[in-house]
Amino acid sequence: VTTISKAYANTTNYVTIRILTSEELSAKRNLAENAYDYAEKAASQQEMSNQYPHASASTEWENSPGQTFFYAKNAIDGFENNRGHGSYPVQSWGPAPDPGQWLEIDFGRPVNAEEVGIVIRYDMPHDTYFESAVIQVTYEDGTTSEQTITIQCVGTEQIFELDIYAKPITKLRILELVAHTSGGWAAITEVKVYSNQPEVELFVNGESIGKKTAEDHFF
């Protein structure tokens, strides 16, 4: 390293670099996380619409116009504090308390998805929770497959193995969400999509810079 940020240019800060362990190299990654996802309702962020992964939803509740506390993008931002509702650090995807809600993650590329992790918002007794849903995946050719899941009322992450995992997917949608209490406030704090990837591709401003393939481990 020949240059270093001024933030570290004193005697009280230091940087360490190490080689990843074999366990870290083989560990499954969350392919859905994007802390910089944009809000579709925000005109000022439309120039970011070619960046992925991207979350969208049937509805996004707003207590006042432009309030982002309950936008779909919050479900993939990497924050899992689910013991409250509202602004950071307890933001979540909070849809209208009506039937027929869905949340979708567009990866912007084909990915191998093996498991889905869901963290429900657990702000009891204010909240109810989604007790069942359908996971729908979209393949590269546009065809889809579905499986039904049962969700527990717990404050920790719940992992669901994708029975429909067979080939790379481009989108994952959680739909047919059924709330435990009709008309109550049910929300999702975080959705994760886990897998190992034999290949990674770097995109800058929507353009591919290159791919990296590993023969002895997954990314």
Image: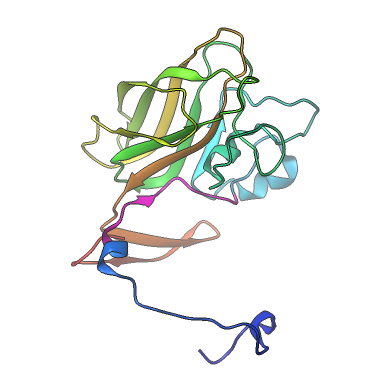
Residue 67, quarter of picture = top right
Residue at 64 percent across and 82 percent down: it is 8
Closer to us: 124 or 31: 124
Q: Residue at x 62, y 82 (%)?
A: 13
Q: In the figure, residue 183 lies in which quadrant?
A: top right
Up/down of 189 relative to 1, above or below: above
Q: Which corner quadrant of the image does residue 49 belong to?
A: top right
- Image position, residue 141 (x, y; %): 30, 35
Position of residue 131 measured from the top left corner of the image (x, y, whole percent): 44, 17
Horizontally, residue 146 falls left or right of residue 31, namely left
Asked if residue 85 lies left or right of residue 159, the reply is right
Task: Indicate yes or no whether the magenta region holds residue 158.
Answer: no
Residue at image coords 39%, 47%: 109
Pick out the residue farthest to the bottom.
2
Chief secondary structure of the magenta portion: loop
**Which residue is at the front of the view, 178 or 44?**
178
Q: How is the image coloured?
A: rainbow
Residue 107 appears left or right of 92: left
- Give the residue at the far top of this rendering: 182
**Quarter occupied by the C terminus:** bottom left
Residue at the right extreme, as displayed: 64
Q: Which residues are magenta?
A: 26-36
Which of the two residues, 6 or 154, is positioned nearer the viewer here?
A: 154
- Residue 137: x, y in percent? 34, 31
Q: Position of residue 150 (x, y in %)?
A: 36, 20
